[in-house]
Image (spheres, rainbow, N blue to C red):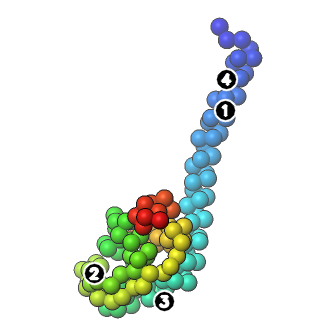
Amino acid sequence: MLTKSMRLLSGVIAGVIFIGLGTSNVFSKESLERKISSGRMLYGNYCASCHQMDGAGIGSYYPPLAKSDFIKGNKERAIEVVGYGLSEPITVNGHHYNGFMPSMYLTNEQIAEVLTFIYNSWGNEGGEVTEELVDQVLGK
């Protein structure tokens, strides 16, 4: 049989666990929102001149990032393009592009932020690109 102090202690422990579980979602949501906000600023500075602020791209020169089938479901490829650049022909949403995209020389954290912004904008699938995934893909 539990004593009064043991019941009190078990209640406190359960409360701490409950609060901890509840706040982890709040922190991860705040973290995602912070990452999207930082990514929006990086996108404006490094990407928008070619891909436009609305992600629509420019004609046959620069592909759209909005509702892009090129990045959909392939975070690793998106990481490689931002990390290393791109100099080969690609097809995006049924249109062919043969331009050149230089590496942006961003940190892995910045790559995660800008891609998280892109994945959560303009009708893309959502989700988060983590710095750990960028480290893994780029080997840094």
Sequence-wise, the earlier of marks 3 and 1 is: 1
Looking at the image, residue 105 lies above or below residue 126: below
Disc 4/disc 2 C-alpha distance (Å):
59 Å
Label 4, residues with CA under 10 Å away: few <14, some 14-19, many ≥20: few
Residue visible at 59% across and 59% down?
A: 31
Q: Secondary structure at mark 2?
A: strand
Q: Residue 15: which disc?
A: 1
Sequence-wise, the earlier of marks 1 and 4 is: 4
Three-letter amino acid code at the position of disc 4: Ser
Three-letter amino acid code at the position of disc 1: Gly
Sequence-wise, the earlier of marks 4 and 2 is: 4
User: Is 31 situated left or right of 8 in this image?
Assistant: left
Residue visible at 27% across and 81% down?
A: 90
Residue visible at 51% across and 68% down?
A: 108
Three-letter amino acid code at the position of disc 2: Ile
Label 1, residues with CA under 10 Å away: few <14, some 14-19, many ≥20: few
Name the residue beneath numbered marker 4.
10
Question: Which quadrant holds the N terminus?
Answer: top right
Three-letter amino acid code at the position of disc 3: Ser
**Whole-percent x, y for residue 61 in the image:** 35, 92
Point out the frontmost of discs 2 and 3: 2
**Whole-percent x, y for residue 37 in the image:** 59, 70
Q: Residue 90: which disc?
A: 2
